[in-house]
Image: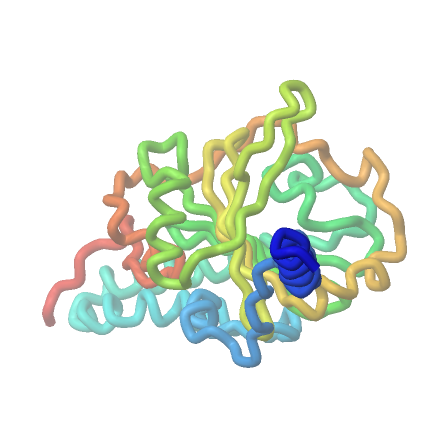
Amino acid sequence: MTRIGLLVTLAVAVLVSFAPDAAAQRRRGQTAEPAPPPEPTEPNANIVALMNGLTWGMSKDQVVEAVKLEIKNKYWPQIQAVADDAVAEQGLRTRMERDQQRFVDSCVKFDGQQTPWNVSMVDTEFTHNNQEEMCKFDRGDATDFLFFIRGKLWKIFRTLNQGIGGGGATFEDMRAQLEGQFGTGEEMRSVDQYTLVSEVVGVKWIDSQTEMALRTLSLYGVLAVVLTERATLANLATLRRAVATESDQGSGLTDAVTEGTAQDENSDIVDRLRGTRPDPTAPPATNP
């Protein structure tokens, strides 16, 4: 064999010996995907804190008692502070009882009847004739919509009353603060039916029990943090056997009126979501 023929033979042998590895690399490159994050095995303490002592599966009666106690605990230091002033004390007790009764009266069953919530910012959060109920708890800076299905708490829809349109935090503000506390969230996107442009409408996080989503409701000018029990969420198709009709559930296209007028700084957003800010309308406590 000539020298040139020998070199050609060696070159072919080298190419053949490397070809399978190169092909494998190409295959690996085509199919390589980042590994999904591990499934959480424990509740996230920060998410649990946002539930303000409530737990998934509580009955409506248990939630009502828990919220009434929370309202009492909010007023009690002020009541104690004016214990020597019978008029002031009675005024605070009256306000406390009024707030407790307002919460009780807010509870509604979705049995196919017309309700103020059929067309509202929460009209896609429930269905009729599926043993669903809701109670509304006005915290002052935030409002909790507490949802029950078959008698068990499964969703907390919390809105910041100042939201986008009230001069408060923007979606980007909230996302940055929550990601600083909970880590990078998974984006939730929606495609505009007219422009076909995809836009971010939310960010979500999960722990072993709860899905937490930050959502922007630009139509209503509010931001919402939605806490949902994952087990119920995965089983909704079974739980919601009755199909919603247009008359049962609103389109979400009407304006909503939100409550609260205080202008707060963005730095206390997480505290506002937790309900740890004092009632901005409460009178200052005085020492006896």
Query: Percent x, y for residue 88?
Result: 23, 60
- Residue sitting at x 59%, y 73%: 39
Residue 26 visible in the picture: no
Query: Percent x, y for residue 40?
Result: 56, 74
Q: Residue furthest bottom?
A: 42
Q: Nearer the viewer, residue 258 or 125?
A: 125
Q: Residue furthest front?
A: 2
Q: Nearer the viewer, residue 77 or 264?
A: 264
Residue 3 placement: quadrant: bottom right
Looking at the image, residue 180 lies above or below residue 76: above
Query: Percent x, y for residue 254?
Result: 62, 27
- 275 left or right, relative to 257: left
Q: Quadrant of the N terminus?
A: bottom right
Query: Percent x, y for residue 62?
Result: 59, 75
State how many labels appear. 0
Q: Quadrant of the C terminus?
A: bottom left
Q: Nearer the viewer, residue 8 or 140?
A: 8
- 208 left or right, relative to 247: left
- 242 left or right, relative to 206: right
Q: Residue furthest top?
A: 194
Looking at the image, residue 29 lies above or below residue 81: above
- Residue sitting at x 83%, y 58%: 237
